[in-house]
Image (spheres, helix red, strand yellow):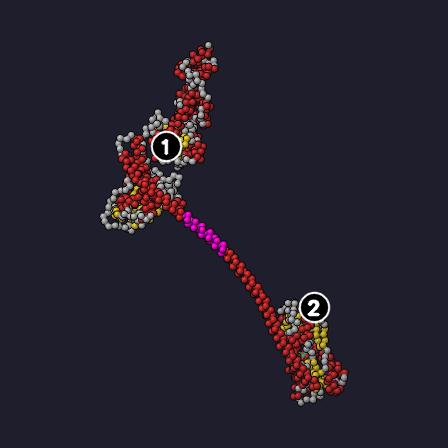
Amino acid sequence: MFGCSDNKVYKIGVSQCSQDDWRMKMNDEINREIMFHEDAVVEIRSADDNNAKQIEDIRYFVDNDFDIIIVSPNEAAALTPIIKQTYENGVPIVIFDRNINGDSYTARIGVDDEGLGKSAAHYALHLLGSGAKAIEIYGLKGSTPAEGRHDGFLKEFETNGGVLVASEPGNWNKEDAIPVTDSLLRAYPDINLIYAHNDRMAIGASEVAERLGRNDIKIIGIDAAPNIGIQAVADSIIDATFLYPTEGHRLIKTALSILKNEPYDRETIIPVSSAVDLSNADILLRQNETLKEETQKMKILKAQIDDYWAQHSSQTSLFYASIAIIILLFGVGFLLLRAYWQRSRHQKELMAQNRLLEEERDKQKQLNEQLQDATQSKLMFFTNVSHDLRTPLTLIAEPVAQLASAENLTPQQHTLIRIADKNTRILQRLINQILDFRKYENGKLNLKLTEVDFNKTVHDWMESFYAIAKKRDIKLTLSASDPEHPLPIALDLEKIERVFFNLLSNAFKYTPDNGTITMSYECDGDTLIFRVADTGEGISERDLGNIFDRFFQVDRIHPKGSGIGLSLAKAFVELHGGTISVESTLNKGSVFTVSLPVTHVSGDVVCPEKAIGRNEVTAELDTIETNLSFDTEKPIVLIIDDNKDIQKLVGELLNDNYNIITATNGKDGVKMAAKYVPDLIICDVMMPVMDGMECCRHIKEEISTSHIPVLMLTACSMDEQRVQGYDSGADGYLSKPFNSAVLRSKCASLITNRKRVKELWQSHIAPHVKTGSEPSARKNIPTSDIDDEFYNRFLEIFKAEMGHSDLNVDKIASMLGLERSQFYRKIKALTNYAPVELIRRLRLQHGRVLLTTTNKTISEIAYETGFSTPAYFTKCYRDAYGETPSEVRSKLTK
Ligand code: FRU
């Protein structure tokens, strides 16, 4: 009863045709029975004796998916179609109480109505004997119980002597029964029995009989519902009633059997029981009371069981929930523990990592400190060295400066002393800058403010730069917003002059000849702004951010300064409470802007002496001119170096014995070499535009210059770079700083080697017959492939053209693709002969071969070898070989 494995809950619909005590009793039974079936619910609807409403109720059950419909049809004819249709659509139908036409139902539970009629007739005859004369209050035309009750009564009654005088429908209710009874009693005053198809109509008839004073008439009803029929009998309102069984429980059981596919009876006709009259009415009523009480108790019990069951289920749920919570708690506890373990493990790991990091940090800190110490020590060292250098440098600078102005020096001595003077000044400036910068970094650099007229001061400063600007064709302009009026401002003049000098020197260093440099300034009362703009090579965006950093250099390979000038300028400007900034575009130029707050100090405006004079500008930016004479007797040396001072120094060292020409980069060097075909080239490795290696390669690949020895002169002394140098064709290598004697000796040896080669050529071309020496084989002369090739080509041209007496140098030079002078120098450099001389000697050499190996006449030989006359041939031959061609012939014929 409580356990149900199938969760399906069946929906049972009960359609009652009416609502009265009999049906209430039945509904109670239905509800009581359903209490025992947890797998089923029931809904009871009443049609209130209305066919249309009952059709609606049936549709409602169908639409709401009721599993089975139990129907007590109001009228058979009216309800049969809907019931048939529903049944045929597959919904199980149980018909009870009243029937339909046909058998379109699943099961039917009815009562033996005819038997009921018979029992009523039998009882009436028992009361009244064969003289019984009755009227019948009929149920409802078209409702099947009424038909059965009528037929059974009539058959039994009239068979046994009773007479049924009239029968009229009371439609199963008291209200309709009263007027019908009234008219029948008035029509048939002699009847002694009223047979009503139910108790309600019987009670109505009893009221009418009483009203008409016919208490003698016996009244029989049907149903025996306790509160109406049995009570009416107990109260002597009617004489007897017959139990019309309700059996609501049977309906539910049958319905569930159908639904669960259990066996059931399709047709159940409940037999009738005996009459209820005064003899048993009380007892039945009491029984009914007892039943009611029991039912009530059962309901209470059921409620308690439900309650208990609910409690049980909630406790079960609670139990399971508790177990779930306990499991959950265990789970959570486990997770917490695990998290705790993991956390402590992580913490340990983190602590270990932290320790490592801390150690690392400490190490880093230590390293940093060491680095800082090292940097400080280095800077200290620089400072100390700078300090130490300053005094001796001053002691050098002074005598050098005095020597430079001496008048009894040779030009060469003068040039050398000027180089020394210039570089001493540069060194002095650098050392001063380093010392100033250190002071600034240590916070010991103080301002010595004096009130100056900035207009005048700037003009003075600019003066020092005009000469170098003119020399380099640089347009140097000064532009001021108000140049006419004094512009008083308190400045540490020495420092701001240094700023100005550094900015302007930089502009000159990075601006090519013919460029423009503009110094402009303006003052708005509070701030003085001055700008130095140039049309130089500019600074890349990457370098702009570092340009004011200490020791930062834009071009590390070809530095044009120490990298301290701009950072010192910044320091000086900031000491004044000002700012310095730069804007620049590569290959277009740069603009440096200095902003200084305009302040004043008491006292007159002073015009101090310039600290930086023309000499310092010259030392920084100018080169020293020399007046070297070109001596045709001396070999030519080409010096290729971007540092003009090195050029000058090397030039001075070699000037005695060589003619010196110079170039400032590889490209110019190659051009100069081709133009002048020097006897030796001294070449730096690291140079702008074209470096030394490439320059050397070009020289060695070019016919006109390939024979020239090249001496690489460089600061790079690594073996690998030497190898590179030799690979590019260099003949010697000398590292800077070099010893002047070594330089001279290297140059001399390279030129001597070259000379030896030339002598070999000479002996090859013109062996003197008197010496008896034979021409040396040309393959023994150390030459380069390119020189060999050149000479072979020359020989080919010569042989082909030899017979023409007008064959000249110009013609051969142009056939070789060279200029006359280049050809001349090349031939001279290779063979030590001028081309004209060489051609003549080669003609004679060939003539000598013809004389000794052929029978050709002397005249023939003279013309064949390109001499204009045999006499001239003879003269030249005798000059060269010391005998005439005829003498050679006569010797041979002897
Ligand atoms: C109730 C009732 C009963 C009668 C039955 C016949 O509605 O009128 O009094 O016995 O119906 O179907």
- x and y, in percent, of residue 622 in the image: 32, 37
Q: Amino acid at mark 1?
A: Asn
In this rendering, the count of numbered labels is 2
Decide: few, some or many residues near mark 2? Use Cα within 10 Å; few <14, some 14-19, many ≥20: few
Picture quadrant where residue 714 is located? top left
392 versus 873 height, above or below: below
- x and y, in percent, of residue 32 in the image: 65, 75
The residue identified by callout 1 is 739
For marks 2 and 1, the one nearer the N-term is 2
718 versus 635 height, above or below: below
**SS for callout 2:** loop
**In this view, which residue lies farthest toward the bottom?**
213
Decide: few, some or many residues near mark 1? Use Cα within 10 Å; few <14, some 14-19, many ≥20: few
Residue contact between numbered discs 2 and 1, judged by CB atoms under 8 Å: no
Q: Closer to us: mark 2 or mark 1?
A: 1
The residue identified by callout 2 is 261
- x and y, in percent, of residue 196 in the image: 69, 82
318, 107: nearer the viewer: 318
Q: Which residues are magenta?
A: 347-368
Image side of residue 411 versus residue 280, left or right: left
519 versus 48 height, above or below: above
Q: Which residue is drawn at the image coordinates 34% and 43% (left, top)?
A: 383
| Magenta stretch: includes residue 453 | no
Q: Quadrant of ligand 1?
A: bottom right
Q: Amino acid at mark 2?
A: Asn
Picture quadrant where residue 139 is located? bottom right
Measured Cα–Cα span from mark 2 to mark 1: 127 Å
844, 421: nearer the viewer: 421
738, 839: nearer the viewer: 738
Q: Which residue is drawn at the image coordinates 45% and 11% (left, top)?
A: 891
Q: Which residue is drawn at the image coordinates 69% and 74% (left, top)?
A: 250
